[in-house]
Amino acid sequence: MNGAVLLFLGLGLLEAEGRCFLNRTQKHCVCYNLSEESVGSIIQCFPASVVEFRGGELERYIAFPITDLDTSTTEMLGSLVIRKIIFGDLLVPEILLARVLRFFSYTQVQELAFESCVFEGRGNWDEMADQNLPILSLHFHNVTSAPLTGREQDLSSLSSWLETLQELAVTGSHVTSLPCGIGRVFRALRSLDMAQNSLGDESLMPTFCKGAFPQLQVLSLQRNNLTSYHSVCESMQLLPELQHLDLSQNKFMADPSSSCQFPVSLQILNLSNTGLDEVLTPLPPHLEVLDLSCNHLHAVDISLSSLKKLFLSQNVLQAAPSIRNYPMLDTLHLDNNLITELPGDEVKLLGHLQDVAAAGNPYNCSCSGAGGLQALAGTGHLGQGWPRDYVCHSPPRYQGRLVKEVPVSVLQCNSAAVIAPLCIALASLGVAGAICLVRSRPGLIRPCHRV
Ligand SMILES: *[C@@H]1O[C@H](CO)[C@@H](O)[C@H](O)[C@H]1NC(C)=O
Ligand SMILES: *[C@@H]1O[C@H](CO)[C@@H](O)[C@H](O)[C@H]1NC(C)=O
Ligand SMILES: *[C@@H]1O[C@H](CO)[C@@H](O)[C@H](O)[C@H]1NC(C)=O
Ligand SMILES: *[C@@H]1O[C@H](CO)[C@@H](O)[C@H](O)[C@H]1NC(C)=O
Ligand SMILES: *[C@@H]1O[C@H](CO)[C@@H](O)[C@H](O)[C@H]1NC(C)=O
């Protein structure tokens, strides 16, 4: 017990009146402004899997005597179920952190997060040399610290731990570059999240230098200061395992077309909200998920044979892309574009499509337009928003009405959307199958049931 209290004391959290609150259902415990008097209430947190410390100032405890722990204490630390510790709104002297970090080797804490913290000064990390910590995931959000450049000694002291780290996030912290040497230490890192920083085009090459992050699979560069898709592509060349790249919320300029190829391992690419007027090329050849939502795209005429999910909401498309270009597609989102008609027949031809969303478009509810959508809705694959957000803009007599309410009579609408299923039904009954196939070809549109 003493040891744990000491450990958490060492990590500070000591301010006027403070207390810990445990939510048993969530196994989440939050401690506010713990003080020396109230530190005993940490006991409440022992059944929690997530413990959060908010507020306080640790500066006063820099000289706090932290001795080695006895066996019963280390055993007790090992029996705690705490998996994640969050430090928030704290001033953290690095010296103190360096002194207490090694105690985590007795715990089963896998995730450590610092939110809105200021790291002060420089710690001496020598004691961490050859220490292995169970922490696999390290998160920093909105933190400030001394610059990372010139910290080779610190990194090498921490290397036996950092070499095993799997997830690192440094978000919202005004980072403009990561020195090459840092990436070389993180040899097992799978996921790197650098969202909401100030990384520019020219800072990527040095960050992803030769030997940096050799096992990286997931990389987020969301909301940085990137403008050149070509530079991004060039700097990804040395990440052979990269599967998921998030470039959303940058502002890409029109690049002269480039021959740079992304790693073939790349499967998920997020280009949402990147100011695009046209689709950037080249795209990774084996892409399975492509998010191009929230841009200014007028047309999408690319072919990707492995693509499963295509997100095109919030653009200015006047027509849905031809689904024939994506034989594996199961998800297609087209909400809030300028599409007047969905080709219901084409959609039905593709067996893989399971999730189509196309709300908020100015639909033409002539009978073929409404019929196509109604047929699609009938398959049960139209996602959220049907029927409420599917509204007719034309012709005048249906303006403002729901697409669902437009009467579509089989006799009136010579649409392939209606004919195709009828033909299939008839053909399966063995009735005039051949005639149906001929008659439903474009230019020969005539309702099958007259046969
Ligand atoms: C614990 O968390 C759940 C889920 O957020 C919430 O519904 C519940 O009210 C919380 N319990 C307490 C005691 O705060
Ligand atoms: C970021 O952290 C600072 C303290 O370093 C805090 O004052 C500020 O409110 C935080 N900002 C956000 C958006 O959380
Ligand atoms: C972002 O990039 C532009 C042009 O490269 C530069 O002028 C600007 O200072 C950068 N902003 C930040 C916050 O780094
Ligand atoms: C792409 O990024 C945006 C945030 O910028 C996010 O809302 C969206 O879910 C991401 N898309 C995918 C497919 O993960
Ligand atoms: C709506 O569709 C009908 C039939 O295809 C067509 O004649 C008409 O011009 C279209 N109206 C608009 C506003 O696109």
Image (cartoon, rainbow, N blue to C red):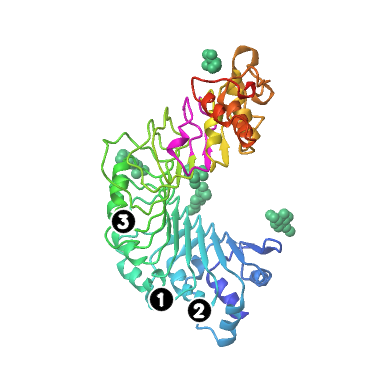
Quadrant of the image for the C terminus?
top right
Query: Secondary structure beneath disc 1?
Result: helix
Range covered by the magenta-colored residues: 311-338
Q: CA distance from mark 3 to mark 2?
A: 39 Å
Badge 3, how many Cα within 10 Å: few under 14, some, many 20+?
many
Q: Which residue is mark 3?
A: 208
Using the rendered image of the protein, determine whether residue 18 is visible from the camera's viewpoint: no
Q: Quadrant of the N terminus?
A: bottom right
Among the two numbered marks 3 and 2 on one chain, the one whose residue lies closer to the N terminus: 2
Of residue 161 and residue 157, the one placed in the foreground of this image is 161
Q: Magenta stretch: residue 34 in it?
A: no
Q: Position of residue 420 (x, y in %)?
A: 58, 30
Mark 2 to mark 1 CA distance (whole Å)? 15 Å
Q: Residue 347 versus residue 73: which sits nearer the camera?
A: 347
In the picture as drawn, the residue positioned furthest to the top comes out as: 396
Dot 2 beta carbon under 8 Å from ligand 2: no
Give the image location of residue 350, x and y in percent: 52, 39
Q: Which residue is mark 1?
A: 128
Residue corresponding to mark 2: 66
